[in-house]
Image: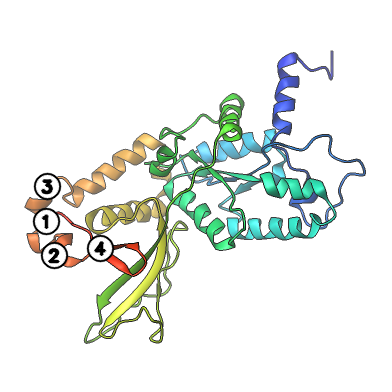
Amino acid sequence: MEGTLTTDSVSDSDFLKEFYIPNYILVPDSKSDSTPPPQLPQCPVLVFINSKSGGQLGADLLKTYSALLNENQVFDLGKEAPDVVLRRIYLNLEKLKSNDEFAAKIQEKLRIIVAGGDGTAGWLLGVVCDLKLSHPLPIATMPLGTGNNLPFAFGWGKKNPGTDVQAVMAFMKKVKNAKEMKIDNWHILMRMRAPKEGSCDPIAPLELPHSLHAVHRVSPTDELNMEGYITFRGGFWNYFSMGMDAQVSYAFHSERKLHPEKFKNQLINQSTYAKLGCTQGWFLASLYHPSSRNIAHLATVKIMKKTGQWEKLHVPNR
């Protein structure tokens, strides 16, 4: 009979209500319903998807999440920057919550799902960090990239997910039941000897992956500045690469930006990454590069474990 629901669809509908956010929360100046919402979602989510990740998987996930949830709580990172979205929604929540207990509870329970690779996850982590919220938003990372090291480290897996309704709902169930964990937020200082001629400043326009905060040069009056050196400061999450690893990662990023059609799925991407590693002599570095180019000869790495106490990190000389 037209309009009837099966037992499974009723159950699915009740499940999805646990994540649903009404329009008046998401869209400033929109009118709320005259009747109060039937139930408070236990796991309201904002979904950010890198539609360019995972070949066509990102675009497929956009369709699935938009069909299951309010389409206004699902965002394509290729069209809307997450900092703009979150500032807009949080400003609206702050305006509403003084007279709206439902809005206050949404803000308290809000979580983020981000579908993309390590770079996309790092982008969202940076944005949430910059917002300086009293209760930072928990972020669930749906592995959609090539390596997916960050999602794997937090138990979300490495393999690109399914994009059908059941696969997405299974992931949402994991998000609802997940416990919050903290992630290290590292600050980094880079110092290099000031050149006798020329400049160390990057050539404009500087195009960085969204996952990276621009590493800014500190001012001459900053206490971190040292005479005879140029000092830069920035931040990172989970891991930081130097030397050959960073060179290969940047080459991969540049190639994908120039030829996105070549990066259709995770297996092809991993193969391309391996080929780039081989061209850099990754596996036979001692034969391709003189020892004088070893990172241990070019840089000194120190870690501050306690305020003001720097400890030198041993870098193998091979």
Residue at the image position 76 percent from the left and 50 percent from the top: 104
Residue at the image position 41 percent from the left and 70 percent from the top: 206
Cα distance between the residues tagged 2 and 3: 18 Å
Q: Nearer the viewer, mark 3 or mark 1?
A: 1
Q: Say whether residue 76 is left or right of residue 99.
A: left
Query: Residue 311 bears which disc, if any?
Result: 4
List x then y, in percent, for residue 245. 26, 53
Residue at disc 3, secondary structure: loop
Disc with the residue nearer the chain's start (4 vs 1): 4
Residue at disc 1, secondary structure: loop
The 10 Å Cα crowd at callout 1, few under 14, some 14 to 19, many 20 or more, is few
Residue position marked by numbered label 3 in the rendering: 284
Determine contact: label 4, label 3, CB under 8 Å. Answer: no
Residue at disc 2, secondary structure: helix
Disc with the residue nearer the chain's start (2 vs 3): 3
Q: Is residue 115 shown to the viewer in this render?
A: yes
Cα distance between the residues tagged 3 and 1: 15 Å
Q: Nearer the viewer, mark 2 or mark 4?
A: 4
Task: Name the amino acid type tagged 1.
Answer: Asn
Determine contact: label 2, label 1, CB under 8 Å. Answer: yes
Foreground: 293 or 220?
220
* Residue 247 occupies quadrant: bottom left
Task: Name the amino acid type tagged 4.
Answer: Glu
List x then y, in percent, for residue 5. 79, 17
Q: Nearer the viewer, mark 4 or mark 1?
A: 4
Task: Name the amino acid type tagged 3.
Answer: Leu
Cα distance between the residues tagged 2 and 4: 18 Å
Residue position marked by numbered label 2 in the rendering: 297
Disc with the residue nearer the chain's start (2 vs 4): 2
Task: Name the amino acid type tagged 2.
Answer: His
Residue position marked by numbered label 1 in the rendering: 317
